[in-house]
Amino acid sequence: MAAGQRPGSATAPLVLGETLTLTLGGAALNGQPCSTVATTLNGQSLVLVVNGQTIPGAGAVFECSAAGELLGSASTSIAGNDDAAQQRRTAWQNAFDGFFSLGKVVPVKAAFGPATGGISTAVQTVHVKGAGGRDLMAAAVWAVAIAALFIAGFLTRFGRDPMPKPVEGVPLPAGYSRPYSLSRFQLLWWSAIVIACYAGIVTVTGSMNTVTTGTMALMGIVGGTSVLAAFQDNRPSPDDDRRAAFITQYLAAAQASPPDSGAMKTALAEIYPSSQGWLSDLVSDAHGYSIHRFQLLVWTIVLGLTFLYEVTRTLGMPELSTELLALTGISNGTYFGFKVQEQQVATPPQGAAAGGT
């Protein structure tokens, strides 16, 4: 910052967290000594007022400059983990017309007034932005790193179904790739969003107590769905009988003279279902595309993007309403209810004998 520039000017915008100082000038003295006016104002416990919004806890301090001008200063910090810090963030959000301006400089009207409301000093225009370049860069690095980590985890190992049980005499196909799991995708998706948002909020605001009750309830719904889906995948099901029939078919085709390579290939694809691509895996079963999977995938993505929007707007995790959580629970419950009846192994052709090896 150049010499003589004060945070809040058009050339040196104030970043939230810095101290805002307004020069009230000689007119505010009304012919009285500056020190007398400063003492009087300090006794009134005035706070910062921005665009008509009283900023709770932003107490003003008045003093005289070397030139005899009256100066008023107040903190613009939104950091902290207590209720007062949350009230300050809410007040600043309202002052920004409901949307924190993180990187853009916004002119606002600032003054000092009683904590109960009103204005006691002249209103001045101040140029403010929500975060400094360094904090924004750090938050962006956090977001990119966490997103890359979870995408890599989803595409490589953690987003796929468990490895099927090996069958003696039936080898895994060359280059076998496990199908992607919708419940695991949902768990990874929300874990990445919540962790990235938390890291970004802490970086910008310095507040660690930002996880809301609604966010915890949401993660509980998602985690519960993943646990139930894993439990269902490990339960005995009609798919086991269909898989056993294909195993018998494969072994019979392999022992034929000459071996029936076409029948072996068809049976092998059902014994060890392979990935058909991540999107196809997430929205389909043995019968093709499934509406219950499609609705859960779309709702998960839409709600996740809305969650990210709210975090950038409020610099805090949203407090999801009971109705929104209930709708998410219904979406997940519908998915699981149909998943219990899903068929992941095709029906064997007529004449294929059932039985295990």
Image: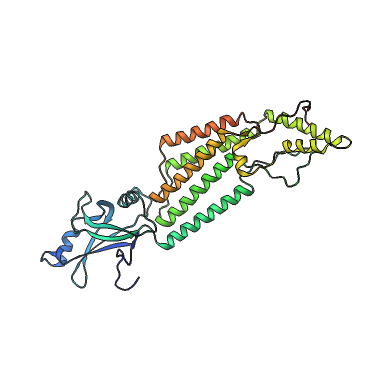
Q: Residue at x 17, y 62 (%)?
A: 39
Residue 222 location, x and y as percent? 52, 39
Q: Please state the horizontal and vertical placement of residue 19, each as a whole percent of the image.
A: 31, 62
The answer to whether residue 357 shows anywhere in this view is no
Which residue is more in the foreground, 58 or 174?
174
Q: Answer above or below: position of 163 versus 28.
A: above
- Residue 168: where, in percent of width, then height? 80, 38
Is 190 or 124 nearer to us in this picture?
A: 124
Q: Is residue 57 above or below residue 32?
A: above
Report whether 163 appears left or right of 290.
right
Residue nearest the viewer, comparing 314 with 106: 106
**Residue at figure coordinates x 25%, y 60% from the top left:** 125
On screen, residue 82 versus residue 345, left or right, reads left
Quadrant of the snapshot with the C terminus: top right
For the point 40% across and 42% down, the residue is 319
* Quarter of the N terminus within the rendering: bottom left
